[in-house]
Image (cartoon, rainbow, N blue to C red):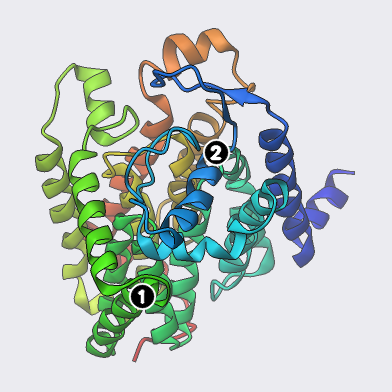
């Protein structure tokens, strides 16, 4: 029985696609039929939906078309602010016309299915390895979809961009990364992948063109002055939205030591750490070095993201899965770290652990974030001090 289940999940290409689609359907049904919800920070007595984030995204398109301020509170429609770009609001026009039940399902399916195809596109991986990564990320995907978030989409776009770059489809790869930036700004750091290829200057130009095209795309429905005003409003909102969450590096440090680190200093330190592995230029032509850089970027996006919250950790878990197959560590050490991420990052907020453990230990001590922080620094150590010990198997594409 175990062997049949293993073969079904790991050796059949369609199995995980079906599983991910079912998870998206389950998350949609849970949210749509969840009834009314009130948020901890809420100060009015209005009931909102369990798919509040989807409503925020959907209504952003309505506000865009009606020349309303995208970044003002619209408490009669949803709780919380829209914090994404006008471009993303335009993108949501593809679903805004649908009834909520169908639109929410489409949104969750886009997040889940794109991640599946992105992992499948990774070169030098057989289907078993790809499906193992998808299985590792399954619980974290459900957490993200339960909040109708965009994080699985971002992870999928970054991984797919890397796979396209390995296939020399540089413009499309840069375009996908540019789209992540117009969802959440930390997607900017994924452009560092361009440095790993000899065509880096061409890719920098492609990136600038892609950013310009996507940034100006809302001109299809608004005037240039309206669009400029929207970007100014978005910038002001992002500047004011700088209180670190408990699962950020700043939040974890505060939970364990009581020290309140300066978020700007932590970000600056993170950027310096981010750049150091790129000094190993002579290893750029090694596929596993590039693959480990991809894992580092996905982990860095969460470890040094001051707004890291539970649904964002799907991005880090994808990084953990990729790192497992690119690392040069001993198998037992890699497995121990991956299992710690599965147990304490993915499963810690679930019913796998009783409430008293979550309430008294996991939440106060920000346990969910710790395995990803540890693995990030292991990845950093490997890239910086032991890049020659990364696997050096025959390359799918040399980057030359």
- What residue did someone put label 2 on? 147
Q: Quadrant of residue 134?
A: bottom right
* Disc 1 secondary structure class: helix
Q: Residue at x 65, y 49 (%)?
A: 104
Asked if residue 275 can be seen in this view, the reply is yes
Name the quadrant of the C terminus. bottom left
Q: Residue at x 34, y 80 (%)?
A: 213
Q: Quadrant of residue 382?
A: bottom left
- What residue did someone put label 1 on? 219
Name the quadrant of the N terminus. top right
Front in this rendered view, residue 135 or 29: 29
Seen in the picture, residue 206 relative to 258 is either above or below; the reply is below
Left/right placement of residue 163 relative to residue 371 reads right
Q: Residue at x 31, y 39 (%)?
A: 307
Seen in the picture, residue 386 relative to 148 is either above or below; the reply is below
Seen in the picture, residue 6 relative to 168 is either above or below; the reply is above
Mark closer to the observer (2, 1):
1
């Amino acid at each position: 029985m175990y062997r049949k289940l293993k073969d079904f999940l790991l050796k059949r290409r369609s199995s995980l696609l079906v599983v991910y689609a079912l998870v998206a359907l389950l998350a949609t049904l849970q949210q749509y039929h969840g009834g009314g919800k009130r948020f901890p920070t809420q100060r009015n007595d209005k009931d909102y939906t369990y798919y509040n984030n989807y409503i925020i995204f959907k209504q952003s398109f309505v506000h865009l078309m009606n020349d309303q301020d995208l970044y003002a509170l619209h408490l009669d429609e949803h709780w919380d602010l829209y914090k994404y770009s006008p471009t993303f609001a335009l993108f949501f026009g593809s679903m805004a016309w649908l009834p909520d039940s169908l639109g929410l399902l489409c949104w969750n399916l886009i997040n889940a299915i794109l991640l599946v195809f992105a992992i499948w596109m990774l070169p030098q991986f057989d289907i078993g390895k790809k499906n193992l990564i998808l299985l590792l990320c399954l619980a974290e995907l459900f957490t993200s979809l339960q909040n109708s978030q965009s994080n699985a989409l971002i992870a999928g776009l970054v991984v797919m961009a890397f796979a396209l770059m390995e296939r020399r489809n540089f413009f499309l790869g840069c375009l996908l990364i540019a789209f992540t930036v117009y969802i959440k700004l930390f997607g900017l750091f994924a452009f560092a992948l361009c440095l790993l290829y000899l065509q880096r200057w061409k890719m920098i130009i492609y990136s600038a063109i892609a950013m310009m095209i996507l940034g100006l795309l809302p001109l299809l429905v608004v005037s240039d002055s309206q669009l400029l005003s929207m970007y100014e409003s978005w910038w002001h909102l992002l500047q004011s939205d700088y209180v670190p969450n408990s699962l950020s590096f700043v939040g974890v440090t505060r939970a364990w030591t009581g020290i309140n680190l300066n978020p700007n200093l932590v970000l600056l330190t993170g950027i310096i750490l981010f750049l150091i592995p790129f000094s190993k230029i002579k290893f750029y032509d090694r596929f596993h070095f590039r693959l480990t850089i991809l894992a580092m970027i996905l982990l860095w996006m969460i470890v040094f993201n001051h707004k890291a919250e539970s649904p964002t950790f799907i991005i880090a878990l994808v990084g953990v899965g990729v790192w497992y197959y690119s690392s040069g560590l001993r198998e037992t050490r890699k497995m121990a770290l991956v299992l710690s991420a599965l147990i304490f990052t993915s499963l810690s907020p679930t019913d796998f652990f009783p409430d008293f453990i979550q309430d008294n230990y996991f939440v106060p001590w920000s346990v969910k974030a710790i395995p990803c922080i540890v693995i990030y620094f292991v990845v950093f150590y490997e890239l910086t001090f032991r890049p020659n010990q990364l696997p050096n198997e025959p390359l799918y594409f040399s980057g030359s």
